[in-house]
Amino acid sequence: MEIVKATVKDVHDIVSLALQLWPENVKSVFTMEFTELIHDKKAVIFLAKEENVSIGFAQCQLRVDYVEGTESSPVGYLEGIFVKEEHRRKGVAKQLLSSCEKWAKSKGCLEFASDVELENDKSLNFHLRNGFQEANRIICLTKKL
């Protein structure tokens, strides 16, 4: 298994994996968004590949606005991480996270952050096992005007 920085050639694989993480999204929109992110110097996508087959991905970006619980800027931010079910509990996500953290450090970040849906205990436990500390819990609200 190897971790590689994604290129435009990997967009199809990234979209396929991302739709498993965020199934409410649309393939064509993801294709456009991930293509743009690959060219963005403030973002990176890493792929975990086994025998040249993509089995997981991590998307991270630099955030310069305030990030809950942090004191510096920019902050490396894990926007999403996903590993196919049959490859979980084998250290793949940990290696993807490590690649994101190294990338953030290379961009001058002193801190790294992420978020988790309130009901996603598996993701919360992954983050806690990998050195994250809970900064806050929020419920986002909207209202039509």
Image (tube, rainbow, N blue to C red):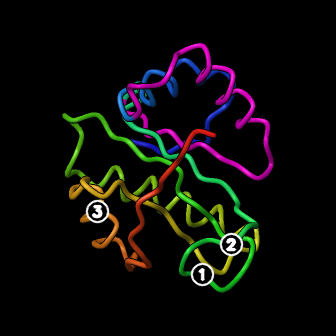
Relative image position of residue 18 (x, y in whole percent): 45, 31
Please, is residue 1 above or below residue 98 in the view? Answer: above
Q: Residues within 10 Å of mark 3 (few under 14, many from 20)?
A: some
Q: Which residues are magenta?
A: 22-50
Separation (CA) of disc 1 from disc 2: 7 Å
Identity of the residue drawn at 74% across and 71% down: 74
Of helix, strand and loop, which one carries label 3?
helix
Name the residue furthest bottom: 71
Q: Nearer the viewer, residue 31 or 101?
A: 31
- Quadrant location of the C terminus in the rendered image: top right
Q: Residues within 10 Å of mark 1 (few under 14, many from 20)?
A: some
Indicate whether residue 27 is drawn in magenta.
yes
Q: Is the residue under label 2 in contact with that under label 1 (CB below 8 Å)?
A: yes
Labels 3, 2: front one = 2
- Which amino acid, mark 1? Thr
Q: Which residue is mark 1?
A: 70
Q: Which residue is mark 3?
A: 126
Identity of the residue drawn at 53% across and 51% down: 79
Q: Is the residue under label 2 in contact with that under label 3 (CB below 8 Å)?
A: no
Q: Which residue is mark 2?
A: 66
Q: Nearer the viewer, residue 51 or 129?
A: 129
Labels 1, 3: front one = 1
Separation (CA) of disc 1 from disc 3: 20 Å
Identity of the residue drawn at 35% across and 54% down: 117
Identity of the residue drawn at 47% across and 47% down: 80
